Image (cartoon, helix red, strand yellow):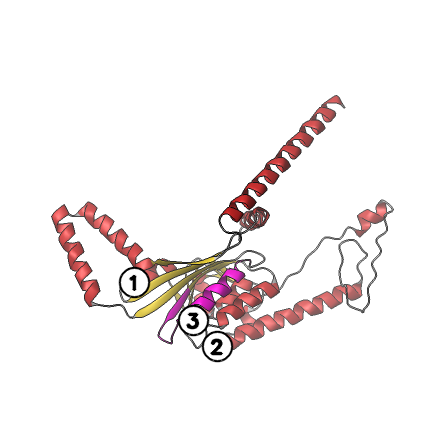
Amino acid sequence: MEFLQDYGLFFAKTITLVLALLLVATALAGIGSRSRGGSRARLETKKLNRQYDEYQQTLERSLLERKAARRLHKQRAKERKQNKLEQRVFVLDFNGDIRASQVDNLREEISAILTVANNDDEVVVRLQSGGGMVPNYGLAAAELARLKGRVKLTIMIDRIAASGGYLMACVGDRIYASPFAIIGSIGVIAQLPNFHRLLKRHHVDMELLTAGDHKRTLTLFGENTEQGRQKLQEELEETHQLFKDYIRRFRPSLAIERIATGEYWLGERALELGLIDALQTSDDYLLELSSRAQLLHLRYLRRQSLGRRVSLSLETAIREWRGY
């Protein structure tokens, strides 16, 4: 008992210290944010052609004699001036979590592009997501659909675009993926624990009052009914049908009933099934484009609270632990 008391006291002190440090960090973050102008957000751009040129020059300086490297650099600079790159390619990144929290940044990036874009331009979206909440990913797909008919939309999948991630990907005019990228998982899932029997064992009652036959289907603490289970299953089936209809709208040649089983496939097999159009990494695709187009990477930055950043980090860690 004495050991348990000492351990409990130590544990309480540790928790108190951690909470105190978090409060201090939050306060400092708030002060820093106010000093930098509060919650201001900005659009950041980066010329990828310049980045590739720097790579090339760095290696050439190491491989060639100094005079030869200088001559080659001057010659290439002259060629670039003569061959003006008229095609424009805007590059976006979308790294999706369960809540598709980056969708707010995506909508701003797309709005910015549409202020200057024309039909000759291309938007390349480097997409990575294992899916998540239906309304959030539905909005993300709808934001991408704003680009349809205005620019060429290319989706690049290097690692994973599953479930809600593929809902976004299917909007693209062309979909490219690496050979071992995870594609598909066209299905809907809902799960939750139920503590009713545990509460009942300890003589704890849970009162749940609703107005409307289907206001609540399954609950965490109440006693679930077969009627509630059936209603939730109907809702899942309806959402799944909407998911399939949306994919069919943008990729009508897909055998939708064959691939909308909740399964996922790696890139090679996804190509055979028509889920993607070609096998290629985003790095290879952009490097090819850099010789004939201006590549501009866009990123809309907004400050997030410390609590928000911690919760997103935990979600990412859990997803990685689960293996997708």
Kindly identify which residue carries mark 3: 115
Three-letter residue code for mark 2: Ser
Name the quadrant of the N terminus.
Answer: top right
Q: Which label belongs to residue 252?
A: none
- Quadrant in the picture for residue 28: top right
- The answer to the question of whether label 1 and label 3 lie on touching residues, with beta carbons closer than 8 A, is no
Which kind of residue does numbered mark 1 sit on? Ser
On the question of residue 158 being in view, the answer is no
Q: Is residue 168 magenta?
A: no
Q: Which residues are magenta?
A: 101-124
| Residue drawn at 81 percent across, 56 percent down | 222
Residue at (19%, 67%) from the top-left corner? Answer: 82
**Residue type, numbered disc 3:** Thr
Looking at the rendered structure, the secondary structure element under dot 3 is loop
Q: Kindly identify which residue carries mark 1.
A: 290
Instruction: Look at the numbered disc 2 and give the secondary structure of its residue.
Output: loop
The mark lying in front, picked from 3 and 2, is: 3
Graded by Cα atoms within 10 Å as few (under 14), some (14 to 19) or many (20 or more), the crowding at tag 1 reads: some
Q: Nearer the viewer, residue 289 or 296?
A: 296
